[in-house]
Image (cartoon, helix red, strand yellow):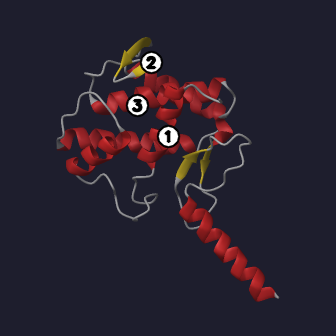
Amino acid sequence: MLFAPDTIDSLVFAAALANTHPGASRSGDDELASPRQLTEFLDQQGYRGRFDRDDAELAEVVETRSQIHDLWELRRDDAVPHVNRLLSDASAMPFLVRHDGLDWHVHAVALSAPLAERIRVEVAMGLLDVIRSNEWERLRSCAAEDCTGVFVDLSRNGSKRFCSVRCSNRVNMIEHRARVAQN
């Protein structure tokens, strides 16, 4: 296993959140345009804790989404001050917890903290593990030319190129048709 389960959960959540952006979403629309959409997204992701379900919370999460997406574009060493700032701004203090049937895992902010703050801290904790494991290259942008989605490559050999099977199939079909046309 490359990362601890809670780290994997944080990283997968971070990529999913980044991919709700209009430029990265499968629909091409902002998939977090309303508090209802945010609630649905959090339910799909199994996110727990305090939810205010209002426009102010949505605005903070949308800003957090941009910060997280921007981290994917950075090199490992350049990401460190951003990750440290996410943690220090929240006065994050790691502690072990068990809840919802999960075994011991790390939290660094209370479940009662505002949603955007929890997201920033939990994602920063996941990224901290990526940085100290020297696995930053596993945070990737989709190789499909017409996709701006991001993903975490959790494959054993680190060879994943696409954010989804949909993008992989589409690129493979385009490449296949180009080969057939050349013959």
Side of 11 where 93 appears, left or right: left
Residue 27, image x, y percentages? 39, 65
Residue 157, image x, y percentages? 74, 42
Residue assigned mark 1 = 12
Residue assigned mark 2 = 103
Q: Is residue 171 visible?
A: yes
- Quadrant showing the C terminus: bottom right
Side of 152 where 89 appears, left or right: left
- Foreground pick, 57 / 85: 57
Tag 2: amino acid? Asp
Q: Residue at (42%, 26%) from the top-left corner?
A: 121
Q: Quadrant of residue 78?
A: top right
Side of 173 where 47 appears, left or right: left
Residue 74, image x, y percentages? 60, 41
Closer to the eye: label 2 or 3: 2
Decide which of tag 1 and tag 3 comes sooner along the chain: 1
- Foreground pick, 18 / 153: 153
Residue assigned mark 3 = 120
Mark 1 touches mark 3? (CB < 8 Å): no
- Foreground pick, 137 / 104: 104
Q: Residue at (67%, 70%) from the top-left corner?
A: 172
- Quadrant showing the N terminus: top right
